[in-house]
Amino acid sequence: MTSDSLRARLNAYRGPAKAAAPATPVAAPSHQTESLYAKHPVTQADLSLPEYVALDFAANTHRSELLFFDLESTGLGSGEETYPFLIGAAGVTATETRLQLLFAESPADEADILRAFTRLAEQKTLVTFNGKSFDLPLVVRRAQRYGIDTSRVGLRHVDLYHLIRRIYPEKPSRLMDAESRLLGFTREGDVRGAEVAQAYFEYLHLGRKDVKDKIIYHNSVDVLSLVSLLKMVSEAFTAARTGNTGWAYKVHRHKSATPQNTRTLLLDRGIANLDARDLDLLSETYRREKNYHKAARLALRSYRTGYAAAAVKAVRHMRRIKGKAASARCLARYALMHEDERVQRLLLPYAD
């Protein structure tokens, strides 16, 4: 569908301009509904959180500071035809999750749901899945259109897309992938993410409540799955602090991990079970301590396992060991013949 035809379709759905919202919001606006969940609607997993949640190796965040959110929009572009029509936002207590859904019954309600979300999100730590790239920028861009202040929204943001891909080996790229691989379920009978916008247009045109209910359910599961995923990530970091790698042994690759965190987790797994990148990381922990014998051995093993750049590090470490200059030169010459230009350029000073 072209942008012109989509814009024309949207204009057809739009009614007369809506009056500005009053300064004092009503207690229960028609576009806002609230539900309490003790269990995930699909997995039946507990949806509470501990008082403090671990977001990395060092920092804990109180659960009351978190706001989980996900939105549905009329498209993925950045033009005027793309706007949010449903925003799900949830806070979590010791016993349950409080989910608030902000639904635009017509395009004229967009400003109302943006104002409501802004009030909920002020000074909160946002938790999303790919929200740094799409959800939050869309909210900010559309809020500016209505003169809504978002300066206190998103100052702290945990994007589970980036966090999970850093510590989980299979690197899920979509929320549904994270659900199937980490939470162990696949949605059945749910409207697909790519079909949600079309379903909304159908609701605007026909007013079918069953279509709206499907959209609401889809977004609700999205938000509640974020709670379950963050709970797993928090448990992984909490366990990793004590040296237990748990389900996400690559948690050591998180930027907050200290060299000692990294070494403890990798040695616990066993050198024989490490991939080339992890061998390189372990080598680096010994290099920082100037233990060049161990650093060189691990870098060489990393290179032999398939990480080409480790050859450069192995050569550098070997040159610092008495009696290993000739071996370093041989390794440099070997890698010069077998590796690409990027590695060759770094090895040239060590080949003579």
Image (cartoon, rainbow, N blue to C red):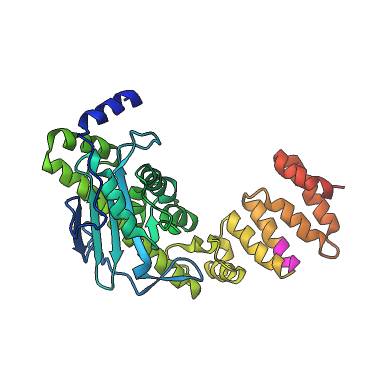
Residue at 21% over, 58% down: 41
Looking at the image, which residue is at 12% across and 39% down?
208
Residue 294 drawn in magenta: yes
In the image, 275: left or right of 285? left
Prevailing secondary structure of the magenta residues: helix
Which x, y percent locates residue 226? 33, 57
Give the answer, above or below, for where 28 lies relative to 262: above
Residue 205 against residue 5 in the figure, above or below: below
Q: Quadrant of residue 82?
A: top left
Q: Is residue 256 left or right of residue 181?
A: right
The quadrant of the image that shows the N terminus is: top left
| Depth check, front residue: 192 or 199 | 199
**Residue 31 highlighted magenta (yes or no):** no
Where does the image place residue 127, in percent across and percent down from the top left?
38, 58
Q: Is residue 189 visible?
A: no
Residue 269 position in % (x across, y down):
52, 67
Q: Could you say which is closer to the camera, residue 227 or residue 73?
A: 73
Magenta-drawn segment: 291-296
* 286 w.r.t. 176: above or below: below
In the shown orientation, is residue 342 left or right of residue 101? right
> Whole-percent x and y of residue 294?
70, 66
How many numbered circles does the render carry? 0
- Res 340 quadrant in image: top right
Q: Is residue 320 visible?
A: yes
